[in-house]
């Protein structure tokens, strides 16, 4: 399920955090789903367990997962809401980018076409 790109400039723990978040948003991981243990994930990905633990700590800090001592880490009930709200916060940046597009002479219909392509794509 999880894959690491060792050639990426993105740190491994950030790749893992991003993948968990993407899987939650796509509905592949749902509230209550148990994540693999740090040890098993480290073994299957050939990654240092401390790196996996760092990713889990970040997900826990953000409220995406909750850790149950002796049982493992689970996707939290609020994970999707937290992630959706986080992305809504990025709308301000998006508006600023749209202003730069307008100044660069990119027409509204080009932008609308891009938006339509993204929203009509079957891949959530």
Image (cartoon, grey):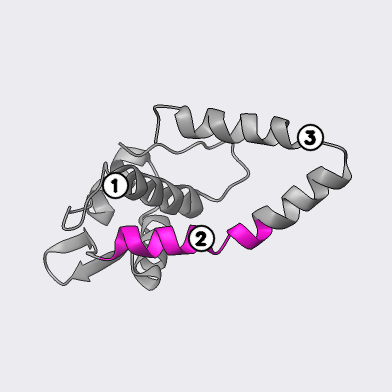
Please say if 10 is above or below 121: below
- Residue 119 placement (x, y as % from top left): 48, 34
Report the residue marked by disc 1.
41
Report the residue marked by disc 2.
88
Looking at the picture, tell me which residue is in the foreground, 51 or 109: 109
Q: Does the magenta stretch include residue 48?
A: no
Please tell me the numbered disc located at residue 21. Answer: none
Query: Which residue in the rendered view is the most extreme toward the left?
Result: 71
- Residue 68 placement (x, y as % from top left): 16, 70
Disc 3 secondary structure class: loop
- Between marks 3 and 1 in the image, the one whose residue lies nearer the viewer: 3
Q: Does the magenta stretch include residue 91?
A: yes
- Between marks 3 and 2 in the image, the one whose residue lies nearer the viewer: 3
Report the residue marked by disc 3.
107
The chief SS type of the magenta part is helix
Disc 1 secondary structure class: helix
> What is the quadrant of residue 66 in the picture?
bottom left
């Amino acid at each position: 399920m999880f894959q690491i790109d060792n050639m990426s400039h993105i740190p491994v723990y950030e790749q893992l955090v991003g993948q968990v978040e993407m899987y939650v948003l796509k509905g592949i991981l749902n509230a209550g789903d148990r994540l693999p243990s740090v040890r098993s994930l480290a073994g299957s990905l050939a990654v240092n367990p401390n790196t996996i633990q760092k990713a889990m700590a970040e997900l826990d800090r953000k409220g995406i997962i909750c850790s149950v001592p002796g049982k493992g880490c689970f996707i939290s009930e609020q994970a999707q809401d937290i992630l959706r709200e986080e992305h809504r916060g990025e709308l301000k940046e998006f508006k600023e980018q749209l202003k730069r597009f307008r100044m660069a002479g990119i027409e509204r219909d080009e932008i609308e076409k891009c938006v339509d392509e993204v929203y009509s794509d079957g891949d959530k």
